[in-house]
Image: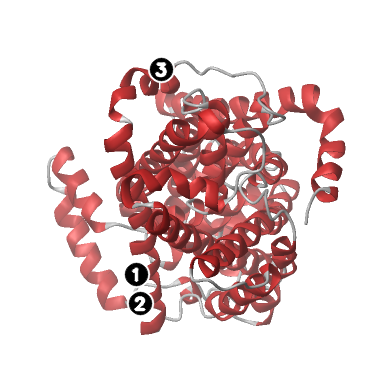
């Protein structure tokens, strides 16, 4: 039975300061609630259009997921396997979107702190596994982010005729990321200007890939459709495991750290039960659809321009930038590609650090922005050593890191399935009848699909994985 007193107590058992995540001023929230009441009186299609223009935390998740892991996974998939794996990022994001919709329903229906809710109504194992997994995933992905960030900075310097050390470039990114992460949510004007610059650079590279697609990809319509619908699993190519690329693509779409940060951003904005439909639309058009468009463009362009000459894992920013050379020239294509990738990985590095700070704050039951947050945000910093290694494997590195983080997701999917079916947690907001069956079936499907690929990989590639990682480190430079 729903215990309202216990739920209300849960709301205040954790620190209440969420402003560090960018809270909405009271007067703005009041105006938003008036706007929402007016929107709810519109026809369904008109409401969706209004919600799309309003925006929300879904766009923050886009900034988190559209990082170096996404770019690397798409470029490797296209270069190594052509159009065969187009279905992977789309499937990963659709399944992840279902999980995010469940998270939004739970968080906005109860208003409870997510870690507290997970601990009390799913179990301590799930809650602590969720928080610790968030930190582990952020640290692991950080290696690939710094490897790629330092590589593109070295390449940009080379275009200008300079020679700079990779590790020095990694330290430069870290020196910039630390104050950005510790000042997250401060509302400073310089931070807002930076975020706008990040968005422009990221969408600029998307626009460049779109232009190249229009020029060289329109004649491949049949192959593109087949790549989406065939769910084909190709044979390994030149030592690149197709299953590994699939898991990396699924893990890059929705990471465990994304599922941790998202509900806190909902609460920080002051959203509640009346925002649930807005949140679903925000997920669909602020995260799912942009991600599918971006990953499709990157994979298709890589398949057309890089697949024929791909000979192994040694693919770096210079080779990948050749995919833009057909449209804007070898120099400007290289520069714009590097800037776009740098914007993507820089924003992701900052948000990874924020995820760790939030996780540590919740586990320690301390306020956001305090000492626990600051120490937590610094946990991924040693991953800057990624800039020391893999000078010719910067993009390939997303595959082994994606495999590691992919194994963390099923635990979280099962936990949110339990919460969605929990009457003790959701009370009158627990789905019933056909809605409960649909929710449970969708969440179970997401868990089963991911779990099947992970089990398949473990059985077929597991014995070689440690040997592969050892070779990767021995071959680094």
Q: Viewer-nearest of labels 2 and 3?
A: 3
- Considering depth in this image, is 265 or 235 the residue closer to the camera? 235
Q: Which residue is mark 3?
A: 226
Q: Which residue is mark 1?
A: 196
Residue at 86% x, 29% y: name it.
463
* Nearer-N-terminus badge (1/3): 1
Residue at 37% x, 53% y: name it.
205
Mark 1 and mark 2 residues within 8 Å of each other at the beta carbon: yes
Please tell me in which quadrant of the rendered image residue 388 appears.
Answer: bottom right
- The x, y position of residue 321, in whole percent, is 47, 49
Mark 2 and mark 3 residues within 8 Å of each other at the beta carbon: no
Q: Which residue is mark 2?
A: 193
**453 to the left or right of 306:** right
- Considering depth in this image, is 467 or 193 the residue closer to the camera? 467
* Nearer-N-terminus badge (2/3): 2
Q: Which quadrant is home to the C terminus?
A: bottom right
Residue at 41% x, 37% y: name it.
301
Q: Which quadrant is home to the N terminus?
A: top right
Mark 2 is surrounded, within 10 Å at the Cα level, by few (under 14), some (14 to 19) or many (20 or more) other residues, namely: few
Residue 366 appearing in the image: no
- The x, y position of residue 153, in whole percent, is 55, 67
Q: Secondary structure at mark 3?
A: helix
**338 to the left or right of 246:** left
- The x, y position of residue 181, in whole percent, is 56, 74
């Amino acid at each position: 039975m729903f215990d309202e007193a216990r739920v209300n107590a849960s709301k205040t058992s954790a620190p209440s300061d969420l402003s560090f995540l960018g809270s909405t001023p009271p007067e703005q929230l009041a105006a938003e609630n008036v706007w929402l009441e007016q929107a709810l009186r519109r026809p369904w299609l008109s409401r969706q259009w209004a919600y799309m223009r309003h925006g929300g935390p879904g766009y923050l998740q886009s900034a988190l997921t559209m990082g170096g892991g996404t770019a690397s996974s798409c470029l490797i998939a296209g270069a190594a396997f052509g159009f065969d794996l187009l279905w992977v990022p789309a499937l990963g994001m659709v399944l992840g979107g279902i999980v995010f919709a469940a998270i939004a329903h739970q968080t906005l229906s109860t208003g409870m702190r997510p870690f507290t809710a997970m601990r009390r109504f799913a179990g301590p194992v799930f809650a602590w596994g969720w928080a610790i997994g968030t930190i582990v995933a952020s640290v692991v992905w950080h290696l690939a982010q710094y490897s790629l960030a330092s590589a593109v900075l070295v390449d940009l310097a080379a275009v200008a005729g300079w020679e700079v050390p990779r590790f020095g470039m990694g330290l430069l990114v870290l020196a910039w990321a630390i104050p950005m992460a510790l000042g997250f949510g401060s509302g400073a004007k310089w931070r807002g200007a930076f975020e706008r610059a990040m968005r422009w650079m990221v969408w600029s590279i998307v626009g460049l890939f779109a232009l190249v697609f229009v020029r060289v990809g329109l004649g491949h319509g049949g192959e593109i459709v087949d790549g989406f619908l065939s769910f084909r699993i190709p044979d390994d190519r030149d030592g690149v495991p197709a299953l590994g690329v699939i898991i990396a693509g699924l893990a890059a779409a929705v990471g465990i750290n994304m599922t941790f940060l998202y509900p806190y951003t909902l609460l920080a904005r002051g959203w509640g039960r009346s925002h649930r439909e807005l949140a679903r639309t925000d997920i669909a058009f602020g995260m799912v659809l942009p991600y599918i468009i971006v990953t499709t463009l990157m994979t298709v362009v890589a398949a057309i321009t890089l697949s024929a000459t791909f000979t192994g894992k040694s693919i770096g920013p210079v080779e990948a930038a050749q995919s833009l050379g057909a449209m804007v020239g070898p120099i400007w294509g290289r520069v714009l590609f590097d800037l776009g990738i740098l914007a993507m990985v820089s924003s992701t590095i900052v948000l990874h650090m924020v995820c760790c700070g939030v996780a540590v704050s919740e586990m320690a039951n301390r306020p956001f922005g305090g000492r626990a947050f600051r120490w937590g945000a610094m946990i991924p910093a040693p991953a800057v050593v990624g800039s020391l290694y893999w000078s010719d494997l910067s993009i390939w590195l997303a595959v082994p890191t994606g495999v590691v983080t992919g194994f963390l997701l099923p635990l979280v999917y099962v936990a949110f399935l339990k919460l969605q079916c929990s009457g003790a947690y959701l009370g009158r907001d627990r789905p019933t009848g056909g809605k409960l069956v649909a929710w449970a079936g969708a969440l179970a499907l997401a868990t089963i699909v991911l779990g099947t690929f992970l089990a398949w990989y473990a059985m077929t590639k597991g014995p070689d994985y440690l040997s592969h990682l050892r070779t990767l480190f021995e071959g680094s430079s």
